Image: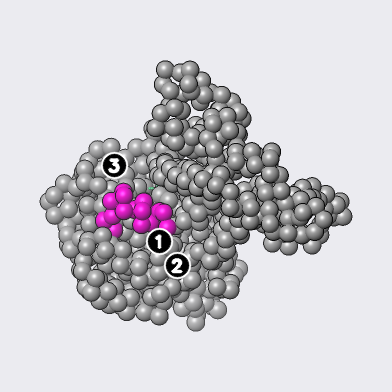
Amino acid sequence: MSNPSITGEATEEAIAILPGARARERASRRTGRARRTPAWAAVVLMVAVVYFLLPLYATAVFGFSTGKHFTLQPLWDGLADDGFQTSLQLSLMYSIATTLLALIVVAPTAYLVELRFQRLRSTIEFLTILPFVIPPIILAVGLESTYGINSPVNLIASSWAPVLLMGGYFVLTLPFVFRAVDNALRAVDVRTLTEASASLGAGQMRTFLRVIVPSISLGLVSGALLAFTTAMGEFTLAALLGYPTFPVYLLNINGYQPREGEALVIVSFVITWAGVIALAVVARRAPGTQIVRGGPM
Amino acid sequence: MSRLELVNVTKRFGDQVAVSDFNLTVDDGELVSFLGPSGCGKTTTLRMTAGFEAPDSGSVVVDGVDMTEIPTNKRGMGMVFQGYALFPNMTATENVEFGLAVRKRPLADRRARVAELLELFGLAHVAGSYPHQMSGGQQQRVALARAVAIQPGVLLLDEPLSAVDAKVREELRTEIRRMVTQLGITTILVTHDQSEALSISDRVVVMNRGAIEEVGTPAQVYAEPRSAFTAGFIGAMNEIPVRIVSGAQGLVERRGHRVTAPGAAGLADGELALLLVRPESLEPLSATNGSLNGDLTLTGQVEVQTFLGATTRLLIREFPAGAGEGPALPPTRRIAVDVPSASAGRWPAGSELAVRVPVEASRVIAGRSAAEAARQTPTTPATPTTPPGV
Ligand SMILES: Nc1ncnc2c1ncn2[C@@H]1O[C@H](COP(=O)(O)OP(=O)(O)OP(=O)(O)O)[C@@H](O)[C@H]1O
Ligand SMILES: [Mg+2]
């Protein structure tokens, strides 16, 4: 491995953690290009910041005031609400289950594709992009007509209902989880590591769990976080299929107790960002990620 | 500590034959190198031995047991990969310990053995380091220690030294040799560095286009190559065209001189052949027109001097042959003569020189020149390589 390719991988990994333009922006800023940022880029950045932060600010102001001065009362009221607790529990349960399911299904699949079924890669990539192409509303309608009250396989009214929502969430999180895991897999030489492990006597299961999983742990963590936040914030499916999850509850409470609702929105926003920051910290600390030799540990 | 046999092993990728009808027996505790140009099938043969690749036909036999259908993790062969392939998430200790943990050795045994190996390979001070915190040479040692830890019957090394610098490479190859001798592990070393192959192997397998060109001890393949390919691939070799006068008597002719030369016996009368002679075997003569009885001489002009350390190589352009004087060197070919550097000043560029071709140190072979043979191998430049530092 030559050094340029190593730095390339490191950058890719950074992008895998926070997909999208913002990560790329950060990555390029780290390489020092930002110092030559033209004025118009700064303007665009300002507009974007205002665009994103203004609603947040408005929400916070509304949620944490009585109309005149600052108070945390709406927050305490919101937290004390029964609906809040049950819906949050439900959402947490679904999100954790979805995350685990996604990891358990995606990680071995992506590993095998990388190792043995390279020919299937384009098919799998296409499949994982589908949720971006098909809006959740279509998915919801489809699930409703296939497994809903009017269908012969009526799952929604049965004890299988949680599985139905989890299935939907699994599909929605697939692109994020697959990307994150796949990026991590491509950054290590999966084939050679597998062969090295086999030459030392390890079977496939041990190789996967002891060698592959730890070396892609970063991708797994970022994939898990993305899956978790996606499931936590998902509204369309839950609302249309009639699951009283946290986002659904938030919308409802906004209707009759708007200040409490807004206060809870801010709280959930803070929690999400805490998660993202925690992820970034983990990413910097994880063994094997300090790739540039001689850098600070 | 096993005897390894590769029997009629063949592997195709699509319609390309990567390895064809490969037969080799590696004795218990023997170190054999696979040497050959890029793409000649060295890695493929090794991978089939390890079980990463299934041969299309033929078998891999260890101690009389057919291993062809046995998966890699049941073969008990140690492998060192070209790019180290250390587990990035494990320290040096954990890497070396991995194979022992798989074998469910008691923890105390494991720890003791790992410590011993790290000590043996001079790695004790990096025991707790992760691969990315180690130098290339250290990583390479860890890879070796890890492969040896499982006490493999057969050790497979795929260009283990190609990624470290020249000094570390020489150090490590001595270490590999010592280790193999000490532990008595049957070892295959893949390399395209001929000096590496010649310096540490018991036997060298010269490969060309998926097939074995020649197998022999380092001294044999260096001094008595049986093919032009081997001659050209190992060390620098002069190829002087000659005509067979009498195959029965082993008599060859060049520019009016007739000599009996080894290897000429049995070749067809009147055929063109090549007389092979190493640059270090050629002897400069004091007079430019000297012709000694029973020997060939070449005369020409020194074109370039190349300083090689103890010796200096003179590249000589032979004076053109007169009409009917028999086979001549191709116009672009030069004769390489190695002289002690101390006396190289006697033959500056532009000076004229006669050299004696000692027949006892040369061999006649039929057929194409090594340059032509090598040209058939797509990715190999036909340059003669420098002699090994042995
Ligand atoms: N997986 C593969 N698929 C297709 N062709 C392959 C594959 N592996 C090897 N080959 C081909 O088989 C031939 C032998 O390859 P191999 O890797 O064994 O050569 P090598 O002697 O190890 O070369 P090098 O010195 O460059 O490592 C090459 O022509 C190569 O292109
Ligand atoms: Mg190779």
Give the residue type at disc 2. Answer: Pro
Q: Which residue is mark 2?
A: B131
Q: Residue at x 80, y 59 (%)?
A: A69
Tell me if the residue at label 2 has its CB under 8 Å from ligand 2: no
Give yes or no for contact between labels 1 and 3 (Cβ–Cβ under 8 Å): no
The reply to the same-chain question for discs 2 and 1 is: yes
Q: Residue at x 46, y 64 (%)?
A: B163
Q: Secondary structure at mark 2?
A: helix
Q: Position of residue B288 (x, y in %)?
A: 50, 69
Give the mark, 1 or 3, whose residue is nearer the N terminus: 3
Is A249 situated above or below B171? above
Give the mark, 3 or 2, whose residue is nearer the N terminus: 3
User: Circle 2 marks a residue in which chain?
Assistant: B
Marks 3/2: CA distance? 31 Å
Residue A159: name its quadrant: top left
Q: Residue at x 32, y 79 (%)?
A: B119
Q: Which residue is mark 3?
A: B54
Mark yes or no: residue A130 visible: no
Residue B358 placement, left or right of A238: left
Marks 1/3: CA distance? 25 Å
Q: Position of residue B249 (x, y in %)?
A: 24, 52
User: Circle 1 marks a residue in which chain?
Assistant: B
Question: What secondary structure characterizes most of the magenta part?
Answer: helix
Q: Quadrant of the C terminus of chain A?
A: bottom right
Q: Residue furthest right?
A: A39
Q: Which residue is mark 1?
A: B87
Q: Secondary structure at mark 1?
A: loop
Tell me if the residue at label 1 has its CB under 8 Å from ligand 2: no
Give yes or no for contact between labels 2 and 1 (Cβ–Cβ under 8 Å): yes
Give the mark, 2 or 1, whose residue is nearer the N terminus: 1
Q: Position of residue B35 (x, y in %)?
A: 36, 56
The segment highlighted magenta reads A200-214
